[in-house]
Amino acid sequence: MIMDPTLVITAACLVGICVVAFALLRGWQGWLDLKRQELERHKRKAKEAPEIEGGASAGAARIELADMKERIKKLEAIASGVEL
């Protein structure tokens, strides 16, 4: 019985596509596991880090403080008659 070359090529392509799909799926699962671990680590750090009043993190508190300082400078400039 002689095998048709088209059938052999088709079967080889199908096997190749399955191998590539399996490798991509394993890579995707690994990436999802990595992101899951990063989220868990971030949640643990957030629980351990002290919170500023109002529940803001330290970074958000620094931004708010810088914003307040800028507002104070503007108000002082307005009070002294200088425009920014």
Image (cartoon, grey):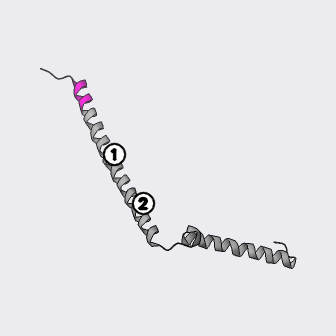
Front residue of this view, candidates 77 and 47: 47
Q: Considering the image in quadrants, where does the C terminus appear?
A: bottom right
Residue 4 is situated, as x and y percent measured from the top left of the image, at 20, 22
User: Residue at point 25% right, 24% down?
Assistant: 6
Residue 18 is situated, as x and y percent measured from the top left of the image, at 28, 38
Which residues are the magenta region? 1-11
Residue 62 is situated, as x and y percent measured from the top left of the image, at 60, 73
User: Residue at point 58% right, 72% down?
Assistant: 53
Dominant secondary structure, magenta: helix
The amino acid sitting under disc 1 is Leu
Q: Which mark is residue 24?
A: 1
Q: Which mark is residue 13?
A: none
Seen in the picture, residue 29 relative to 17 is either above or below; the reply is below
Outermost residue, right side? 81
Residue 55 is situated, as x and y percent measured from the top left of the image, at 55, 68
The amino acid sitting under disc 2 is Leu
The quarter of the displayed image where residue 36 is located = bottom left
Disc 2/disc 1 C-alpha distance (Å):
23 Å
Count neighbours of disc 2 (C-alpha within 10 A) and say few if under 14, some if 14 to 19, many if 20 or more: few
User: Residue at point 76% right, 76% down?
Assistant: 73
Q: Which residue is mark 2?
A: 39
The quarter of the displayed image where residue 68 is located = bottom right
Marks 2,1: beta carbons within 8 A: no
User: Residue at point 32% right, 41% down?
Assistant: 21
Seen in the picture, residue 54 relative to 12 is either above or below; the reply is below
- Please tell me which of labels 2 and 1 falls first in the chain: 1
